[in-house]
Image (cartoon, rainbow, N blue to C red):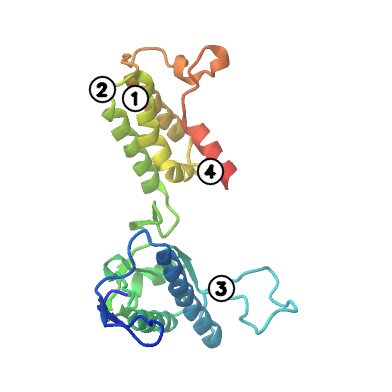
């Protein structure tokens, strides 16, 4: 799709003059998502089939019972990859198995013209044995002739909008949420907008834009962390109304039935996110 392609559109009886396509499909064209789905679905099937044929997985399966009547073989419910739009994660229980899956991806992308951004591709080794993990070097895996970068379990990375680490630590995501709210709060510190519009600007920039990250505050977040985010939000609403921070916060916390403004606060965002799940 990226390299120049030659085409000969068919007319009634014969082919027309040669047309050179220097780019892929036009942005906004209705054929763009259709073509993408055709290729990305085929791409995801290839490592799945390879894993089933060569028993490459990581203990992941679809369904609780692998002995159903519709079970084609012992690996029928096994899968070794997940995809979201153009982000793909693949799993294997051995370095050799992972390299085989990488080779499959390399072969397919070379055939169809897709490109893999190796700079954004990382290898994460998960091992419960901390001593073995620290003593044994990470395997050297390659794709398109380039060695994959290795990410430590404690290294922070961004995936699908979330900042986290391989060990499940979501503190980095919480800090991203906090910094977004602070930036949005300071954005309306000295504004010339009507208070209602300044409030809407804050909620769009600081709250709704980071709603998915706010969801990460649920569960492991402490009460003090939620209160801290709540405090930042109230400060922003005071900025919107040109009020000093010493002003009582009850106006923005209380519901409208109790003479408050019923402003958007962290728990409301979290509740909405949970209802959407």
Residue to which mark 1 is pinned: 198
In this view of the protein, can residue 89 be seen by the observer? no
Instruction: Locate residue 265 relative to residue 75 in the image: left or right.
Output: left
Q: Which quadrant is the N terminus positioned in? A: bottom left
Residue to which mark 2 is pinned: 191
Residue to which mark 3 is pinned: 59
Q: Quadrant of residue 90?
A: bottom left
Q: Are marks 1 and 4 in contact (CB under 8 Å)?
A: no
Looking at the image, the residue that sits furthest to the right is: 69
Query: CA–CA distance between discs 1 and 4?
Result: 31 Å
* Circle nearer the N terminus (2, 3): 3
The percent position of residue 114, horizontal first and vertical second, equals: 34, 75
In this view of the protein, can residue 185 be seen by the observer? yes
The percent position of residue 177, horizontal first and vertical second, equals: 37, 41
Q: Nearer the viewer, mark 1 or mark 3?
A: 1
* Circle nearer the N terminus (2, 4): 2
Q: Nearer the viewer, mark 2 or mark 3?
A: 2
* Residue 219, disc: 4
Q: Are marks 2 and 1 in contact (CB under 8 Å)?
A: yes
The percent position of residue 259, horizontal first and vertical second, equals: 52, 12
Q: Residue at x 34, y 68 (%)?
A: 25
Q: Dot 3 lies on which element?
A: loop
CA neighbours of label 1 inside 10 A, class few (<14), some (14 to 19), many (20+): many
């Amino acid at each position: 799709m990226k390299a120049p392609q030659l085409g000969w559109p068919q007319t009634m009886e014969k082919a027309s003059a040669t047309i050179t396509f220097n780019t892929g499909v036009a942005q906004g064209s209705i054929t763009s998502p259709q073509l993408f789905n055709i290729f990305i679905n085929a791409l995801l099937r290839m490592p799945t089939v390879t894993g089933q044929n060569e028993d490459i997985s990581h203990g992941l399966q679809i369904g609780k019972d692998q002995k159903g009547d519709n079970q084609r073989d012992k690996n029928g419910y096994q899968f070794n990859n997940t995809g979201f739009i153009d982000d793909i994660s693949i799993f294997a229980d051995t370095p050799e198995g992972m390299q085989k899956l990488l080779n499959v991806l390399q072969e397919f992308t070379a055939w169809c013209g897709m490109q893999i951004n190796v700079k954004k591709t990382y290898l994460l080794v998960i091992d419960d044995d901390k001593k073995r993990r620290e003593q044994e070097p990470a395997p050297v895996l390659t794709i398109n002739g380039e060695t994959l970068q290795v990410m430590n379990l404690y290294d922070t990375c961004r995936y699908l909008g979330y900042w986290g680490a391989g060990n499940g630590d979501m503190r980095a995501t919480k800090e991203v949420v906090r910094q977004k709210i602070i930036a949005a709060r300071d954005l309306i510190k000295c504004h010339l907008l009507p208070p209602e519009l300044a409030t809407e600007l804050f909620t769009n920039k600081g709250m709704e834009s980071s709603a998915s990250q706010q969801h990460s505050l649920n569960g492991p977040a402490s009460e003090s962390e939620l209160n801290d985010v709540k405090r930042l939000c109230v400060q922003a609403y005071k900025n919107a109304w040109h009020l000093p921070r010493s002003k009582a916060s009850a106006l923005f916390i209380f519901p409208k039935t109790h003479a408050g403004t019923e402003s958007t606060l962290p728990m409301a965002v979290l509740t909405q996110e949970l209802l959407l799940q």
